[in-house]
Image (spheres, rainbow, N blue to C red):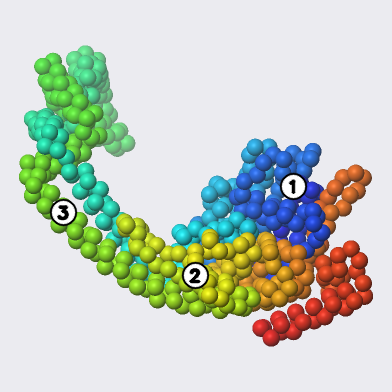
Amino acid sequence: MLQNLHVKNLALIDEIEVEFGPGLNIMTGETGAGKSIILGSVNLALGGRYSRDILRKGAQFGLVELAFVPENEKQLKKLEALDIYPEDGMILLSRRLMDGRSTSRINGETVTMSRLKEAAGILIDIHGQHEHQSLLYKKNQLLILDAFAGEHLKAVAGQVKDAYKDYRSCLDEWKKANLDEAERAKEASFLEFEIREIEQANLAPGEDEQLEQDYRRMNHARSIMENAAEAYELTGGSGEGASDQISRAIRCMSDAARYDGRAEELYRQLSELEGLLNDFNRELSDYQSSLEFSEEEFHAVEERLNEINHLKTKYGNSIDQILKYCEEKSQRLQMLNDYEGYLLSLQENLKKKEEKLKRHTEDLSRLRKGQGKILERAVEEALQELNFVDVKFEIQFAELEAYTANGKDDVEFLISMNPGEPVKPLAEVASGGELSRTMLAIKAVMADKDQIETLIFDEIDVGISGRTAQKVSEKMAVIGRSHQVICITHLAQIAAMADTHYVIEKTVTDGSTRTGIRQLAEEETTEELARILGGAEITGAVRENAREMKELAKDYKTRIS
């Protein structure tokens, strides 16, 4: 759930901090007190757009922080998939707003806006007037049905997605394959040229590496030969080389070795050294013989390397890649030469892919329709509980012209709110208040299936009053049993159901206007209800009415607990 909200330097907010509780959290306040700023700041923390004028006058930056304590196991697994883990049981989302730019963080680590929104979508669900309007779009209605069906659709929906991917890939290949004869001839001619060029090179795997090694050796042959010759002269050549010097030293030590044991040991070491040097000189001599430099061989190696490097620039970065390219193009050429057979094979494959997709799509549609009937009854009952007495709610299924990754179902929610009226699309009959209640009914039905712990409702009371408002408050209390709900309201019936009640107030100090928020004590909640009920003058009767409303709300919450 959302445990803490911290806002600094936004609009009329200097700095506020709110500790939210479980269940139903209600916010009330005078018109213009800044209720929209509070929820607007939550939207900003979750990646919403902002403009420079949202910052408090004179402030260099704005800050919004949301501290969540996730408890739902499925929710935690989704966060783990994003490599996000609670620290001390908490996940902190923050956004620092500056002139024209912002910085987003999760648990203190800077993240991209898209990553912030992904995490937010797992942790919190905000429903305002815009979200109510989203009910009017058929694609969102399909998403609601699939979310309700949940595990019932998961396996088949995955099969449809996989089958659609295979089908689209085969279909794209089929479309590309339908070339005219002139294009096929042009492509075949070009392929023949490429294949011939590679085959005539007669490439051998690893040949380029050996050639490069030979080229480096030949290119430095003169320097190698000069250094080897000098080393030979110094160690075993004519003159005063190391070999001649050691021979003299051995003759000198041979006499000494006859009279002294230590000298004899040194004599043997010197003799071994002479043997090692002689072996070295023989190997060095053989090496010098192998260094014979051939200008003709050098140019042949150079030309062969140039040929191979030319092919690399066209067909791959290595001989293996070039040969693989040649094999692929040979197969393509063979297919072009037998194009009718290729098209026939492709057509048969496409037919099989489409039949498989059709089979899985029909399975998905059948399951959806079954779950749709269950959702229809559940939403209709929830709407009746929200004072739609004679409401009828239906889910209409049509078939799209083409397959999609979600199958071919075209789902639309239909509703009738008056006796004798036929069901019609939501967009044609629902007002703003009716849409709000319809969304609330759906959220109530989805409460047990929804993995998001925190729900925020803004403008849920648009266009309602009296008995309808009471019904809405009861439904909000029901959702609050399984979710944390945060709601801004203008209605006393909804406010009376609060598990935790906050009042948003605007004050003027030294010519500066500030918005603040504070949690109300038990006795203060009755006074706030009286203010909402009484308007300009709060009489004793109004206070008594507020106390009674609070007691009735307590009784109702006890019954549903």
Q: Which residue is drawn at 50% across and 78% down?
A: 377
Looking at the image, the residue that sits furthest to the top is 239
**Secondary structure state at the residue bearing disc 3:** helix
Give the amino acid type for the residue marked by disc 2 in the picture: Val
**Residue 65: x percent and y percent?**
68, 54
**Secondary structure state at the residue bearing disc 2:** loop
The quadrant the C terminus occupies is bottom right
| Of the two numbered discs 1 and 3 in the rendering, the one whose residue sits closer to the viewer | 3
Q: In this view, does 93 lie to the left or right of 535?
A: left
Q: Which is more N-terminal, label 2 or label 3?
A: 3
- From the viewer's perspective, is residue 161 above or below residue 64? below
Q: Which residue is drawn at 75% across and 49% down?
A: 8
Which residue is tagged 3?
347
In space, the residues marked 1 and 3 are separated at their CA atoms by 62 Å
Circle 1/circle 2 CB separation < 8 Å: no
Q: Is residue 470 left or right of residue 116?
A: right
Give the amino acid type for the residue marked by disc 1 in the picture: Leu
Circle 3/circle 2 CB separation < 8 Å: no
Q: Which of 439 and 551 is in front in this view?
A: 439
**Secondary structure state at the residue bearing disc 1:** strand
Residue 215: quarter of image: top left
For label 2, count other residues whose C-alpha is less than 10 Å away and answer few (under 14), some (14-19) or many (20+). some
For label 3, count other residues whose C-alpha is less than 10 Å away and answer few (under 14), some (14-19) or many (20+). some
Q: Nearer the viewer, residue 444 or 434?
A: 434
In space, the residues marked 1 and 2 are separated at their CA atoms by 45 Å
- From the viewer's perspective, is residue 297 above or below residue 42? above
Q: Nearer the viewer, residue 464 or 475?
A: 464
Which residue is tagged 1?
10
Which residue is tagged 2?
423
| Of the two numbered discs 1 and 2 in the rendering, the one whose residue sits closer to the viewer | 2
Give the amino acid type for the residue marked by disc 3 in the picture: Gln
Residue 187: quarter of image: top left
